[in-house]
Each structure stands twice: as C-alpha cells, then as structure tokens.
Image (cartoon, rainbow, N blue to C red):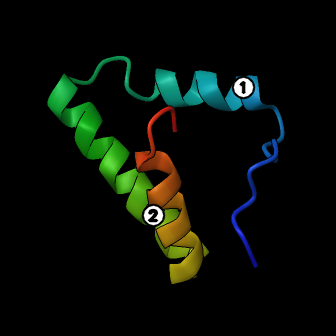
C-alpha cells in the first residue's frame, strides 16, 4: 500500500471551506493546536507507519 496522491476527497472545496471555517474564531495558537490534533486523529485512523512516514517525507520536501 502506498500513499494516495491523486485527488480522493468528495467535495474538496466544501472540505476546504469547513477546515478554514473551523479555525475562523481561534487564535493562531489555538488553530495550531487544532491542526496538530487533527493530524494525530487522522494519523491514528490511517495507522500504517509506512504510509505516515511517506506523508511526513513528502510534506517536508520543498514545494510539498
């Protein structure tokens, strides 16, 4: 199994709007905390360390 890099979210614009809206009234610090919790929740859902390591590597790469 490898990391899915092709678009795979139903209603990506709606998801983006929901994500941005969820942080609208938060301080920068609280928004960062929320993002960290979201990453950990989704990482736990994925569960596969190989996939998670690949995602970290790709996200950290220049232009990632």
Give the percent coordinates (x, y) of residue 31: 28, 32
Tell me the crowding category of disc 1: few under 14, some 14 to 19, or many 20 or more residues within 10 angstroms, Cα based: few
Between residue 29 and residue 50, name the one nearer to us. Answer: 50
Residue visible at 46% across and 59% down? 57
Classify residue 63 as left or right of residue 60: right
Classify residue 52 as left or right of residue 1: left
Which label was assigned to residue 14? 1
Count of marks placed on residues: 2
Q: Is residue 33 above or below residue 28?
A: below
Give the percent coordinates (x, y) of residue 38: 42, 52
Q: Quadrant of the N terminus?
A: bottom right
The picture quadrant where one finds residue 61 is top left
Classify residue 62 as left or right of residue 37: right
Which label was assigned to residue 42? none
Q: CA distance from mark 2 to mark 1?
A: 20 Å
Task: Say which element carries label 1.
Answer: helix
Tell me the crowding category of disc 2: few under 14, some 14 to 19, or many 20 or more residues within 10 angstroms, Cα based: few
Give the percent coordinates (x, y) of residue 14: 72, 25
Proximity of marks 2 and 1: CB atoms separated by less than 8 Å = no
Q: Please, which residue is most extreme toward the front here?
A: 62
Q: Please, which residue is most extreme toward the top here?
A: 24
Residue visible at 83% across and 40% down? 10
Between residue 8 and residue 63, name the one nearer to us. Answer: 63
The picture quadrant where one finds residue 33 is top left
Give the percent coordinates (x, y) of residue 19: 52, 31
Residue linked to disc 2:
41
Q: Earlier in the sequence, mark 2 or mark 1?
A: 1
Residue visible at 21% across and 35% down? 30
Residue visible at 45% across and 64% down? 41
């Amino acid at each position: 199994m490898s990391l899915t890099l092709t678009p795979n979210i139903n209603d990506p614009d709606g998801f983006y709007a929901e994500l941005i809206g969820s942080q609208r009234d938060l301080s920068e610090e609280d928004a960062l905390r929320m993002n960290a919790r979201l990453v950990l929740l989704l990482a736990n859902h994925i569960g596969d360390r190989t996939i998670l390591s690949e995602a970290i590597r790709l996200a950290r790469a220049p232009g990632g």
